[in-house]
Structure formats: C-alpha cells, structure tokens
Image: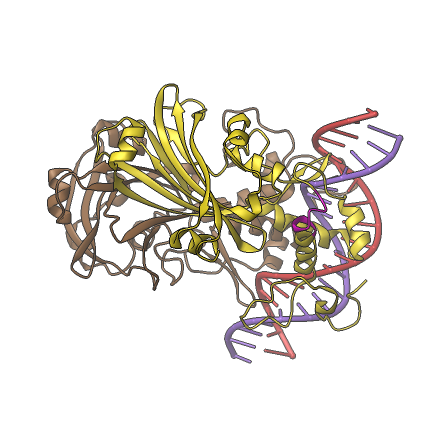
Chain colours: A yellow, B brown, C red, D purple
Amino acid sequence: MPVSPAPRQPREASLAGLPAASEALPEYVPLYQQIKSLLLRSLQLGEWQPGQPIPSEHELAARYKVSQGTVRKAIDALAAENLLVRRQGKGTFVATHAEEGTRYRFLRLARDVGGPPPALDRRLLDCRRMRSSEEVARALQLAPGEPVVEVRRLLLEGERPVVLDDLWLPGAAFKGLDAAKLEQWRGPLYRLFEAEYSVRMIRAEERIRAVPASAEAAALLRLPQGTPLLQVERRSFTYGDRPVELRRGLYHTASHHYRNELS
Amino acid sequence: MPVSPAPRQPREASLAGLPAASEALPEYVPLYQQIKSLLLRSLQLGEWQPGQPIPSEHELAARYKVSQGTVRKAIDALAAENLLVRRQGKGTFVATHAEEGTRYRFLRLARDVGGPPPALDRRLLDCRRMRSSEEVARALQLAPGEPVVEVRRLLLEGERPVVLDDLWLPGAAFKGLDAAKLEQWRGPLYRLFEAEYSVRMIRAEERIRAVPASAEAAALLRLPQGTPLLQVERRSFTYGDRPVELRRGLYHTASHHYRNELS
DNA sequence: GAGTGGTCTAGACCACACT
DNA sequence: GTGTGGTCTAGACCACTCC
C-alpha cells in the first residue's frame, strides 16, 4: 500500500523502463499511470499474447499492491487506446488483429453504396528484400542501406482492382518473410505480423493526397494514366512509438471512398 | 439515493427526453449514463453556454442525488466526446470552437513541411439562399425544396488558393446569415454558428476521394483543369445526431495533405 | 484559504459468462 | 455457483487556480 497517510510520492525508483524522454519530466505521476506503464511493459515483453487474457483486476491489484480501482483505471486507459479489450464476465484480453470486428481496423476504405464492408481479394505482385532507400530509412528510423522487405500487392473487389499497395518493413524484424509466406497466408497482414513475427501494430499516422496515376499504377489498376487516385501514406507504430511499417496505398475512388469520423 | 439495498432499477420514469430509439431498448441503464443523458439535455437546451462552466461535480451530485463519483463518470464520458472540457482547479466547461487549440479542430489539412498549422486566409466567393436540391435535402434530412444557405469560399495560404469549399446549411436554423455577416466575421465558421445561431457542431463524418479539377474549380484554384484534387465531403451533426451542415471541400494537395491518426 | 477537479481506497452489489 | 468485469458509494487526501 504505497499511498497512505504519507505524502504522495512518485514510484520512480521501482519503475524502470519508462521513456522519461527529453522533456521536463513531471515530478508527480499518478499511481494508475505508473501501473499503466507496468502493464505496457508486460505487453511489450510479450508476457501476455494477443488474444489471450491478462490476469484479473483482483490479481493485478494484489501483484502491484494497489486497490482494484487503481488497476481498473490503468486498464481503462489501455482499453481506450485499443491495446486491451474488456469483456464483461470473461476477462480483459490483449488486443489482436485477428478478431471479427477489429480485423482491418486500420483500413478506412468503404463502398459508396451501402452494404457490408468491401471484403477484398488480394493479389501479391512482388516481395523482395533490398537495401532501404533514403526515404524508407527515414520513415522507419533505420540507417540508409539497412535491409528492408518491399511488398507490392493489389486489393480487388471481384475482378476490379481497387487498391495498389506498396509497403516496406524493416528486414531485421521480419526474418523469413517472403512471397511464399505471404501467398499462403489467409487473413489480415497485421495478424500475420503479430502471430509470426511478434510485431504488433498499435497505432498509425496517415497522410492523404490526390495524385495522378502513373503509367505503372494505371496499368496495374487498369485505369487510364493520369486518373486521380487517393494516395494514402501510412506509418504504423508498435510499442514505444517505434515505426515498423511504411505503406503507400493508391485507392481508386470511383465507387469507394475513405471514411473518417471527426469529433 | 436511488440505489441501495434495493434491486437496481432503471430511472426511466424520472428521465424523459431520452431517444429510446427504435431498437430493443435495454432494460438496464447504468446510473451514470442516465446522468449523462440529463447533462446532454441541459447542453442541448442551452442551459449552459459554450465556453461557460457547468456546475461543480459536488453541486451536480446534490442536484441529481447521486454520489460525486457517478457524476464524475458521466462527465468523463462527455469529455471523451469533446462536449465538455475539464480544467483542474477551475471547473468543467462547455466545449467551444473558439479557443486556441480547438479552433479548426475538424480541419485535417496540414503542410507537408513542418512548421505550425497552415493559418489560412479566407475569401468569400458567394453566399445565397436557395431551395435545396435533392442531394442536399437528403444529406440534411430536409424535404426537397426547403430553403438552404449555400456558401462558396476559398482558403488561401498567402496568395495561393489551397481549398475550395462549398457548403450548405438549413435555412431555417440560420436566419439572417448572409454575405455581409460572413465577410465581417473573424474566426472559425463554427464559432460563428454557435455564437450567433446556437448551432453547435459536435461530430462530423467525412468521405474522401480523388477527383479531377472541373473547369470551374480549376479556374478558382488557379490550376490546370483535370488536376487531381482531394474531395472531402463532410456532414456535421449537432445534438441528437441531427445533420446541420453539408460541406464539400476540394483540397489542392501539392504541398499540403490530409492527416489522420488511426488506433 | 476556499473551491475545483483528480487520485486512491475499501467495500457492497449487479450483470454477464461459464460450468 | 464461482469468477469476471461493471457500477455505485463514502470519505480522505492531493494538485491546481484564484483570491
């Protein structure tokens, strides 16, 4: 019981592994945020696997010697960031890209006319290992020339190509990833990454612009060259804000669109 | 004190004004959600104005005869939706589009190269009252032909046009809105709407696609016809999910982009 | 110092899922 | 029934803001 009739003091001593960053570090950190950091560390270290339950609130409260309410608040924060999923009566689970409902949760493509989500087919066009370009190295925070995996693929609705995706992954983290692996895989890419390479995408930033289809893109998407395409450039991050994927998608938005919610 | 050694039962009797909707209504609604609905109603009725503080948690707890913790949870939920803003030591305030930091919070345009947010100039091109088209009526849930206000404007960075905005508002809710009013107004449009017309935008949906610049758009944006533009179609909603604005923006994304965060 | 939101606790009870 | 998360309470104390 760390807090009592004694002045509240940070637990910094017992809490290594926090970023601490460069900024003026706050002298007071609420207990529940410290617990949150501990949970985050366990997640990062793989103590609990995606899809699996973490210990009960009661148990965690005992482990960290705080009240259940404090553990609760820490879990609430992580659930709000989609790192954990609470299920009443069952437990709290490590988020995964595997489940119905959260599969493709980073894909904001929608059909113009109602109906269920697109349900796109994939066609792998290319997968090769290479030395990273300047641009890719910068985006992935690698040294220029470090090995990366480059993947190109199409997403199709029926026979119609809708998205041309190029993506780059740090080679070191994805040893063994190759065309065969991708070809045989059924399901979301991010599910493959978390299951086989222990890389969990938890957050992403996108930059969107309109560009004319290059000759190459036009051919692959079977469109006239110069057709306006939505270029979606995504950087995905894993724990600790480490970028682990750069992706450039070209969306044909004649009968689809990118949807977004603002609040 | 509604909950005690008695079986927990809904307060429906004392809580009118809830949507109740069409769906199978849940037989059990947590107290804090009921309180949330009450707060929402007060907001909708204008009992507290944007930028002004709402009563303290203590006072609200007394008013609704629940514990402070329950009020707290209700406020937390509303703060998470950006309807309220908490400020430690000062109070809880009704969100507004006026403040630095939340001004233009629906505008996701960013400059490619770093630096502060765009800081765009505006140029009003047109403002007229007219009968709504089919399309606009559908989007705003009006009967076709009902009066709407149509506005067209440019956003410029220095001398360079970056965005061409067309927007439509229900005429009934915006009596007196005209070109003069818009010309003289300094600050975010949504601030004008909440200050002068009591219309508060709390949520929006956007559909984004790439389109070629029409002759008209090209001329206004000073670009070659056919230049790919980002078309951002936004529907903004006020309390009760009532749509009160349709907006179609054409963004020139040569040195700007639309940014988005996924999680 | 007084008032506000923010944290933390301890305990009771409820809703839900599994067995 | 047992165990899980979810709600609600009451009270103590802390951090922040303004007078």
Name above or below for residue B85 compared with residue B235: below
The residue that appears at 31% across and 27% down in the rendered structure is: A255
Q: Is residue A48 left or right of residue C6?
A: right
Residue A87 part of the magenta segment? no
The residue that appears at 27% across and 27% down in the rendered structure is: B143
Q: Is residue A121 left or right of residue B57?
A: left
Q: Is residue B167 visible?
A: no
The residue that appears at 75% across and 46% down in the rendered structure is: A57
Q: Position of residue A203 (x, y in %)?
A: 51, 47
Residue A46 part of the magenta segment? yes
Quarter of the rendering containing residue B232: top left
Q: Nearer the viewer, residue A113 or B148?
A: A113
Q: Is residue B251 left or right of residue B39?
A: left
Q: Is residue A221 visible?
A: yes
Q: Position of residue A114 (x, y in %)?
A: 39, 24
Q: Nearer the viewer, residue B99 or D12?
A: B99
Q: Is residue A118 left or right of residue C13?
A: left
Name above or below for residue B115 compared with residue B153: below
Q: Position of residue A214 (x, y in %)?
A: 25, 37
The residue that appears at 48% across and 56% down in the rendered structure is: A141
Q: How many marks?
A: 0
Looking at the rendering, the stretch of residues picked out in magenta corresponds to A42-48
* Residue sitting farthest toward the top: A158
